[in-house]
Amino acid sequence: MNVGDSLRKNLEFWHWYPRLLCRDLTEEQLHWQPDSHPNHMMFAMWHAYRSEDDIIHRLLMQEPGVFATQGWYQRLPVAEPGKPPFGTGLNREQIADVRLRLDDLLDYAEAVRASIQCYADGLSEEEGAQEVPLPFFQPVYPMLDTMSRTEVLSFFCIGHTAEHLGEVQYIKGLLGLTGAPL
């Protein structure tokens, strides 16, 4: 089984799932910030897909992500994206200023998925096993100083994305809504 086949169902699910989680939510609900938490649902999702796009394209593919190459910066404008440019380090007020349209964000998630799936489909097992240094993780996660290309794909496209979609469910719960419809 090649790398793309091993990731396909997870990539499809974790990039489609926000459509289900956010169905019937209002703009006010999507951008509500709990008193105890700085993020709103739209920010959590934007951060998940924007960081996935940037990290996978720059780190593994050695090229700019779809945010830049497909003009998503025009449809998803964020005045203060943070450093790195996917929301890391923003304060509560800066996060509140991230106001995006859900349909645009969902379309972006799909564009990120499609590009990453195409890359993964082209990786052989040997290429997927190649180690990649992760110096930006060293200060916080010393056990993650390197990962294989396949592990990087799984970590950022599945694990990190699932973490932030769990955050969306948490915020929905604080609104008195059901997170996942299970």
Image (tube, helix red, strand yellow):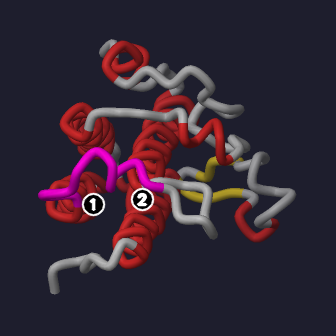
Q: Evaluate whether residue 104 shows in this view.
A: yes
At x 42% / y 76%, what residue is drawn?
174
With 107 as the anchor, is 94 left or right in this view?
right
Q: Which residue is mark 2?
A: 161
Instruction: Say whether residue 3 is magenta.
Output: no
Give the camera-side residue of 80 and 56: 80
Give the camera-side residue of 77 and 159: 77
At x 43% / y 20%, what residue is drawn?
77
Label 1, residues with CA under 10 Å away: few <14, some 14-19, many ≥20: some
Callout 2, which amino acid?
A: Thr
Question: What kind of secondary structure does the magenta stretch mostly adopt?
Answer: loop
Q: Earlier in the sequence, mark 1 or mark 2?
A: 1
Q: Which residue is mark 1?
A: 14
Dots 1 and 2: beta carbons under 8 Å? yes
With 167 as the anchor, is 6 left or right in this view?
left
Position of the N terminus by quadrant: bottom left
With 96 as the anchor, is 69 left or right in this view?
left
Give the camera-side residue of 14 and 90: 90
At x 71% / y 32%, what residue is drawn?
83
